[in-house]
Amino acid sequence: MISSNDTVATLQRAHLERLQSAYADILAAQRFDAVLIYSGHAGVHFADDQEASFKSYGHFVHWTGASHHQHDWLLIQPGSSPRWYYYAPADFWHLATPAPTGVLAEVMTLQPLRDTGWPPESDMAARRLAVIGNLEASSLPAGAELNPPALLAALDELRMYKDDYERHCLFVANQWALKGHDAARNAFAAGASELDIQLAYLAATRQRESQVPYQNIIGIDHHAGTLHYQHYDVEAPGTPKSLLVDAGHSHAGYAADITRTWASVHADPLFERLIQGVTDYQQRLISRLAPGLDFVELHREMHRHLAELLVETGLISISAEAAVESGLTRAFCPHGLGHSLGIQVHDVGGRQRDGQGTPLPPPAEDPALRLTRTLDVGMVVTIEPGLYVIPMLLAPFRQGAQRETVDWAAVDRLQDHGGIRIEDNVIVTAEGHDNLTQGRPIAED
Ligand code: GLY
Ligand code: MN
Ligand code: MN
């Protein structure tokens, strides 16, 4: 149990100790003496000298929190302190990378690298060495093994379980993202365009676009019905009806992933009723989170709630059971209930049963479900039910034998409102769960 006197530094020290001990066990079990983790580096656009956007490799960030370090290495060798080779060239074109500070500098041995390329050969010699990262096998030191699948499965498994430091980072990321969502809502109410809402979000969250954990989704009206809508219209429509904002923040390498949907004064009252309905059952689904719960079962429960809402609001005239059975609810919500959240917005390990990497594929009828595990203490998940009008998915029902069972006039009225998604980030605890989007801090700075 954490006391409120715990500082973030205390939590971070404990996090690094946990990683050291877990890596020692994993490396011993897999007969490696050390693992060298490459941060990665940005690609360059074809026939250009401009770099593409870049994020460091997740297992590197797990230790360092440095999500934009390029050409760095981290050598983990049980019995020695982690050795961080950070790329800091003598470069008058760019600002030099500052040396890591704080707990990282206390716990790790820091070594600047003046050039890109491998750490000194002498540091990697005479070991059963695993190397992980986006590298060419031909460039490897002799005898080293690149991205051993069993090692990656074990390290992904470690990432599934968040400790109190990680929980703190996710909480802080959530608090920032919520400020952005407030700003987005206010901008929308003032008549802003998608681009202006995005700019208001970035300003409120003090981020540049390259820092957000995933591209913010800001959809007005029918754009809200494109699940990963990727543009920002410069002009606002004259009488906007709806806004869906799926936008996050990154804190010390950890992502928030929050969605809110708003109706304007021009919205159809049915749309407002549906937002309330989705919000209500999202909260009911969250209230079920606890260790031992099968996430696939909870995903199915989402479909039952969605079906009931469609029946209650008169959008469909078959039973809720029949709506789920026939696949109709999947046409209204084709994505999964949620996913693991951490360093990556869709974090690793969600579709494996254990540290051996035993696959746990999604059910055939839910191919987009990214989390198929039984929940356990320390897992952080998103809960993000949705309800959309996506004509290409509804078309088979509109033309098929069941066409009389849907109120197509109402569906057509809703189409230019796009859709609804409500998303919170929740940690599973021994007592049940803690909603990081609506909860309280566990540490003081
Ligand atoms: N922001 C992407 C997602 O919610 O999964
Ligand atoms: Mn999201
Ligand atoms: Mn999500």
Image (cartoon, rainbow, N blue to C red):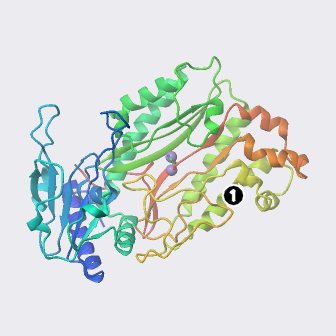
**Split into 4 quadrants, where in the image is the N terminus?**
bottom left
Q: Which residue is mark 1?
A: 303
Residue drawn at x 69%, y 42% is 274
Left or right, residue 361 beside residue 257: right
Q: Position of residue 317 (x, y in %)?
A: 86, 50
Tell which of 10 and 159 is nearer to you.
159
Q: Position of residue 2 (x, y in %)?
A: 28, 63
Kind of residue at badge 1: His
Beta carbon at label 1 within 8 Å of ligand 3: no
Name the outermost residue toward the top. Answer: 238
346 to 428, vertically: above or below: above
Quarter of the rendering containing residue 83: bottom left
221 to 343, vertically: above or below: above
Quarter of the rendering containing residue 26: bottom left
Residue drawn at x 22%, y 57% is 5
Quarter of the rendering containing residue 3: bottom left
Left or right, residue 186 beside residue 19: right
